[in-house]
Image (cartoon, rainbow, N blue to C red):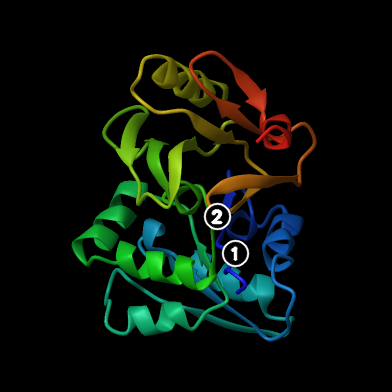
Amino acid sequence: MNSIEKKIIAIGGGGFTHQLDESLDQFVIDQLKKTNIKIGFLATASKDDEKKISLFYKRFENNEFELSHFNLTSNINGFSKWLLSKDIVYIGGGNTVFMLEIWKKNKLENVFKDAYEKGIILSGISAGAVCWFDWILSDSVGPGLNPLRGINLISGSCTPHSSNIERMKQFESDIKNNKLPNGIAIDDGVAVLFIDGKPTEVYSSRKNHTAYFLDKDKKINLKEYIKNI
């Protein structure tokens, strides 16, 4: 019996909502070897920002895709049916705490888990990249950067935007000081593909931008880490 590959694509920053890094979006699409792909977009973290939603349609409109979005800030009725009918869901960036509070209050993390188990590709940028992990280094918890619980589809911790030196220093420090478990840092313009919870590929649309694995003792290029797991 073939088991379903469970895929998550975490993007550190950039992408179509910033009108950058078109190849990052293509990397997400390329994970599916089929036509008539159904893509759903969630802009919850930006409070369903209409500009981001229109950029989603603009980016993918000339392809053979079936596109839709769901405004979770105004209504959750029918969300489970909507999500479970997709091939790919793409989660936009913004305020991670705001987004996760809506998910948790309405028990939507269980719907995402069902989608994941079914083989629907979960992808997203910034808030939409890190929400899948046990722990997040987030700038949406009070002042500065602080640990935040994610929805536990991938073990360990994650920070987006690690091309920001201050953020990377904080991530390293929090892991060394037991505030966060071992984790993965993803630069802007970089996507990491996880299959069954393990990082398997790093794709970068920007020169000298990559992703890293960190534990208490070391920070290594994620591509090197992948070779040894």
Kindly check if marks 1 and 2 are in contact, taking CB atoms under 8 A apart as contact: yes
Q: Which residue is pictured at 48% across the width and 37% down the height?
A: 158
Q: Which mark is residue 5?
A: 1
Q: Residue at x 54, y 34 (%)?
A: 184
Residue annotated with mark 2: 196
Residue closest to the eye, 167 or 37: 37
Secondary structure beneath disc 2? loop
Q: Residue at x 68, y 86 (%)?
A: 36
Relative image position of residue 132 (x, y in whole percent)? 43, 51
| Residue 190 appears anywhere in the view | no
C-alpha separation, residue under disc 1 versus residue under disc 2: 6 Å
Which of the two discs, 1 and 2, labels the residue nearer the N terminus? 1
Residue 164 sits in quarter: top right
Neighbour class for label 1 at 10 Å: few (<14), some, many (≥20)? some
Q: Quadrant of residue 66?
A: bottom right
- Counting from the top left corner in percent of width and height, residue 84 is at 44, 79
List x then y, in percent, for residue 185. Answer: 56, 33
Q: Quadrant of the N terminus?
A: bottom right
Which amino acid is tagged 1?
A: Glu
Q: Secondary structure at mark 1?
A: loop
Residue 210 in which image quadrant = top right
Is residue 67 shown above or below 197?
Answer: below
For label 2, count other residues whose C-alpha is less than 10 Å away and answer few (under 14), some (14-19) or many (20+): some
Q: Is residue 112 above or below residue 209?
A: below
Quarter of the image with the C terminus is top right
Look at 35% across and 19% down and name the residue there.
178
Above or below for 53 versus 183 = below
